[in-house]
């Protein structure tokens, strides 16, 4: 990824951190994809008869982060029906706008990209299109503003994405095990590609707000899916925090991929056990308890929130 004129320091830093000479990129054994899949199958075999193939267990990065956090909150939120909203839709709109920016003629204005993105998504036939068609003027204005903030921060923080870097937004990944466990997700942004058995692709998650340990675990899950799909792992994972202009990379190794397999097996075991009510859910009190839908019925969460509020008052 070569340099470009008139880059600000943030853009130049990203360009330098993404760059890598071909001879420095790792190579991986072609058998790795089969080893990872076999480990998943061995770990999930005991659950095989507990899951109905007509009602498979869908596994996403969000589900894993939820169940590996507070299990009580996980169960409570599973009971809440899904509904599109501005906070949920803004990411999809922003990612579509970033995709359009790659092929936009001339210097793109973020709000023009956002409006075009909303227009195209409204013409779809999925749940988001239905919500956009029914959204109020206030919701539409709020969506434009929040998506515009994301797109503006991306365009001013990142070097222009050149077509030869093979950029792809919301790249879909899917893995089925025993027709009962379906692991899937969408990577915010991918750059590059594998060169035979030599790693070359970079998987990137775009985040707003603060850092969290599970953000990198999300990308490791995607790296596992990509490796089983393609055979050659990505060479780098990176979480980019738009509000902070912070780039957190992690090289991909075999140990990282097998750790992702172990976490996925552990998470699916927890999901199946909790849904079958084979054991009581554990709690993991944190500041997130303040917004938890189970707070009114959770003594651990209430005690944590009370103590946390007292700490804030003493500060």
Image (cartoon, grey):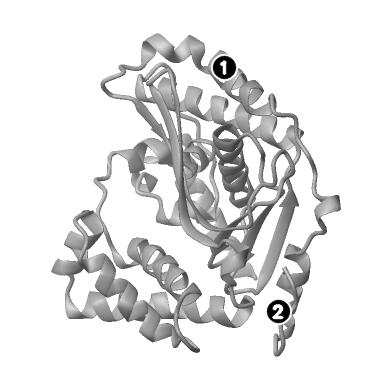
Element under disc 1 = helix
Element under disc 2 = helix
The N terminus appears in which quarter of the rendering? bottom right
Please name the residue that numbered disc 2 is placed on: 10
- Crowding near pointer 1: few (<14 within 10 Å), some, many (20+)? some
Q: Position of residue 242 (x, y in %)?
A: 58, 72
Proximity of marks 1 and 2: CB atoms separated by less than 8 Å: no
Q: Position of residue 199 (x, y in %)?
A: 72, 45
Which circle marks residue 293 in the picture?
Answer: none
The C terminus appears in which quarter of the rendering? bottom right
Q: What residue is rendered at 37% in x and 13% in y? A: 50
Q: What residue is rendered at 39% in x and 47% in y? A: 295
- Crowding near pointer 2: few (<14 within 10 Å), some, many (20+)? some
Q: What residue is rendered at 15% in x and 68% in y? A: 133
Q: Position of residue 71 (x, y in %)?
A: 46, 35
Q: What residue is rendered at 56% in x and 43% in y? A: 222
Question: As displayed, is residue 138 above or below residue 210?
Answer: below
Instruction: Give the quarter of the image for residue 224.
Output: top right
Q: Nearer the viewer, residue 79 or 27?
A: 27
Please name the residue that numbered disc 1 is placed on: 43
């Amino acid at each position: 990824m070569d340099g470009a004129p008139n880059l600000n320091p943030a853009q130049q830093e990203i360009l330098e951190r993404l760059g890598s000479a071909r001879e420095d990129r790792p190579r991986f054994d072609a058998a790795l994809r089969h080893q990872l899949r076999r480990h998943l199958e061995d770990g999930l075999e005991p659950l095989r008869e507990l899951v109905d193939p007509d009602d498979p267990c869908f596994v996403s990065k969000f589900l894993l982060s939820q169940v590996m956090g507070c299990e009580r909150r996980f169960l409570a939120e599973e009971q809440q029906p899904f509904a599109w909203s501005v906070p949920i839709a803004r990411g999809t709109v922003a990612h579509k706008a970033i995709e359009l920016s790659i092929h936009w003629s001339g210097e793109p204005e973020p709000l023009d990209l956002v409006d075009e993105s909303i227009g195209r998504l409204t013409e779809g036939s999925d749940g988001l299109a239905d919500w956009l068609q029914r959204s109020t003027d206030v919701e539409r204005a709020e969506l434009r503003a929040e998506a515009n903030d994301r797109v503006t921060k991306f365009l001013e923080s990142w070097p222009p994405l050149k077509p030869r870097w093979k950029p792809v937004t919301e790249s879909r990944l899917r893995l089925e095990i025993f027709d009962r466990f379906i692991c899937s997700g969408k990577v915010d942004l991918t750059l590059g590609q594998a060169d035979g058995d030599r790693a070359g692709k970079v998987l990137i998650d775009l985040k707003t707000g603060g850092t969290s340990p599970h953000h990198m675990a999300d990308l490791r899950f995607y790296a596992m899916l990509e490796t089983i799909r393609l055979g050659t792992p990505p060479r780098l994972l990176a979480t980019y925090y738009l509000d902070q202009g912070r780039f957190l990379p992690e090289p991909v190794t075999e140990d990282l991929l097998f750790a992702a397999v172990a976490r996925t097996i552990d998470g699916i075991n927890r999901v199946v056990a909790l849904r079958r009510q084979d054991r009581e859910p554990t709690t993991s009190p944190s500041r997130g308890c303040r917004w938890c839908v189970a707070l009114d019925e959770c003594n651990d969460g209430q005690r944590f929130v009370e103590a946390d509020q007292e700490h804030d008052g003493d500060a």
